[in-house]
Amino acid sequence: QVQLVESGGGSVQAGGSLRLSCAVSGYTYSRYCMGWFRQAPGKEREGVAVIDSDGSASYADSVKGRFTISKDNAKNTLYLQLNSLKPEDTAMYFCAGGEVGYNDYGEPLIDQDDFGYWGQGTQVTVSS
């Protein structure tokens, strides 16, 4: 049974940092792609970052230069480092596993339709 369990969310002030973790079990995730998505109240879920089996990563424009996705295959854990947080980053953050497509430059695409396994989410709240 596949399980993805997020942790690390919390409340911080603007400019602060958090590190989210996603522990994965029942899934050979080292062979597949992993991603982080978020959903703010009243808004649709959107992609944040994805990383493929080779470690190539893509980011949404809104988080480039501030967030970093990484993974530790030995620990079966996915991470998202969130720096320089803004109030508009407030959302429930979800990790997901699946297989991504690629653009013409070989960069993995951020498309939630490619992800079939999802965690329950961890809340990030950023105050101004």
Image (cartoon, helix red, strand yellow):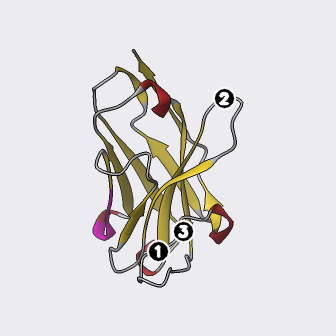
- Mark 1 element type: loop
Q: Amino acid at mark 3?
A: Gly
Asked if the magenta segment contains residue 120, the reply would be: no
Q: Residue at x 37, y 59 (%)?
A: 77
Check the image and report above or below for 92 versus 108: above
Check the image and report above or below for 60 versus 14: below
Of the pair 28 and 89, the residue shown nearer to us: 89
Determine which of the numbered discs, if any, sits on residue 108 in the image. 1
Read off the residue under disc 2: 41
Check the image and report above or below for 29 versus 4: below
Read off the residue under disc 3: 26
> Of the residues under marks 1 and 2, which one precedes in the sequence?
2
Check the image and report above or below for 82 versus 95: above
- What span is in magenta? 69-74
How far apart marks 3 and 1 lie (CA) works out to 24 Å
Q: Residue at x 33, y 22 (%)?
A: 14
- Mark 3 element type: loop
Of the pair 58 and 23, the residue shown nearer to us: 58
Q: Amino acid at mark 1?
A: Pro
Main secondary-structure element of the magenta-colored stretch: strand
Determine which of the numbered discs, if any, sits on residue 58 in the image. none
Q: How many marks?
A: 3
Q: Is residue 107 left or right of residue 114?
A: left
How far apart marks 3 and 2 lie (CA) works out to 31 Å
